[in-house]
Image (tube, grey):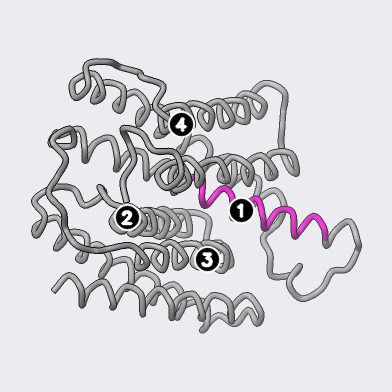
Amino acid sequence: MSEVLYVAVLVLYGAATVFYLVFLLRSVGSRGKAAVWTLAAGFAVHCLFTAARYLEAGYTPITTMHESLSFFSLAIVGFFLAMAGKYRVALLGSFVTPLAMMAMLASASFPSAIAPLNPALRSGWLGIHTIIAFGGYAAFAVACCAGIMYLLQERYLKKKKLGALYRRLPSLDTLDDINYRCLTIGFPLLTIAIISGAIWAESAWGAYWSWDPKETWSLITWFIYAALLHGRLTIGWRGRRAAVLAIVGFGFILFTFVGVNLWLPGLHSYR
């Protein structure tokens, strides 16, 4: 059952990606609605798949690269749909949905078999820590996409080539506001995830912090976003600088999430 649902998610997200890219090229209301509804349907099926996987495994399905990349995609889509309802910036989906689709395709490249749970992971903290962390990752993913859109819009304005895409992209102020809102949501979630992870580590391994590669890179990523938030609140960092740092910060998120797991073995490594 879960395999059928997984394939259905791939198909729906793939269709939504196509709809959004067509909408990006030719902004027609009907295409935008088709993209949103298809993505929402994919999200609903994705939730069913995750629930089925949970019932089959007996624990929160975020313990392998297959499961975690799938959940990452789910979190990105869910966060985007919530933001789209608030800001009504449908075109943002043309940048967010391909990212979610790539995460799903990446998850498909890893073994999907349910493996016995590592004793250290048999804790209620598994669901709490990982879900909060992925919520923060999703917020930063959307901030990154808004940052890319900001740089594109700014480039059009500086070159004074106000083409068709310029007219469809949201204003710089709107994109900067989305970036900031994502930061104010993602940073507290990342902070809570690190704290909850430390508490879990103490109960599992007897130490709150062991400078494991995952812990180290999580801390580095936290400092990057802390600097960005501090700059926005105290120095007035906005616009291009904030957009660039949102993109750079998400690059560190991806390395902390994927790169560390694959290339830097440690207590948090999984495949």
The amino acid type found where label 4 is placed reads Ser
In this image, 150 relative to 50: left or right? Answer: right
In this image, 245 relative to 73: left or right? Answer: right
- Per the image, the residue denoted by label 1 is 146
Circle nearer the N terminus (3, 2)? 2
Disc 4 from disc 1: Cα separation: 22 Å
Q: Which residues are magenta?
A: 140-155
- Per the image, the residue denoted by label 2 is 71
Disc 4 from disc 2: Cα separation: 18 Å
Disc 3 from disc 2: Cα separation: 18 Å
Badge 4 density bin: few <14, some 14–19, many ≥20, Cα 10 Å: many
Secondary structure category for the residue under label 3: helix
Tell me the chief SS of the magenta region.
helix
The amino acid type found where label 1 is placed reads Ala
The reply to whether the magenta stretch includes residue 53 is no
- Per the image, the residue denoted by label 3 is 93
Q: Position of residue 188 (x, y in %)?
A: 43, 30
Any mark on residue 218, and which?
4
**Residue at figure coordinates x 42%, y 64% from the top left:** 106
Q: Position of residue 212 (x, y in %)?
A: 39, 27
- Mark 4 vs mark 2: in front: 4
Badge 2 density bin: few <14, some 14–19, many ≥20, Cα 10 Å: many
Circle nearer the N terminus (1, 2)? 2
Badge 3 density bin: few <14, some 14–19, many ≥20, Cα 10 Å: many
Circle nearer the N terminus (4, 3)? 3
**Residue at figure coordinates x 35%, y 68% from the top left:** 108
Circle nearer the N terminus (4, 2)? 2
Q: Is residue 156 above or below residue 254?
A: below
